[in-house]
Amino acid sequence: MSATRLLVLGVVRMYGRAHGYQVRRELLTWSADEWANVQPGSIYHALKKITAEDLLEQVDVEPGEGGPDRTAYRLTGEGAQEYQVLLSKALSDPQLTTRTCRPRSR
């Protein structure tokens, strides 16, 4: 299971609609780059892939503030189901939780 996939779906679900920069900023406040090894590039890749799988849908494109346009996404019904499945797997598999949620050694 991909921690990135679960976390991206979770952030979009939490906000109702979110753009990539918002997802990235939220995950960085959680330090997900450290304990789940979620990197900024993987967030944008996940958004595109999850959208192509019809788990997210694009709802708006906003002009970026001094940068590229921001595409906003929201969960589809299938995306909400996928989130629940991934969350259940993550919570019920102690080995999975240990592998994906351990701090990296410095």
Image: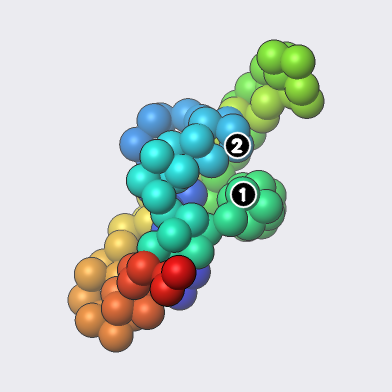
Please, what secondary structure does the residue beneath circle 1 have?
helix
Quadrant showing the N terminus: bottom left
Quadrant showing the C terminus: bottom left
- In-image side of 50 versus 36 (left or right): right
Quarter of image, res 91: bottom left
Amino acid type shown at disc 2 = Gly
Q: Please identify, in this view, whether the residue under mark 2 or under mark 1 is nearer the observer.
A: 1
The residue sitting at 34% across, 36% down in the picture is: 14
At which x and y percent is residue 12? 45, 39
Q: Considering only vertical position in the picture, is 28 above or below 2? A: above
Disc 1 crowd rating (10 Å Cα; few below 14, some 14-19, many 20+) is some
* Of 97 and 76, the residue lying toward us: 97
- In-image side of 34 versus 85 (left or right): right
Q: Which label sits on residue 20?
A: 2
At which x and y percent is residue 70? 68, 26
Amino acid type shown at disc 1 = Pro
- In-image side of 42 versus 12 (left or right): right
Q: Considering only vertical position in the picture, is 55 above or below 19? A: below
The residue sitting at 34% across, 72% down in the picture is: 102
Query: Which residue position holds label 1?
Result: 40
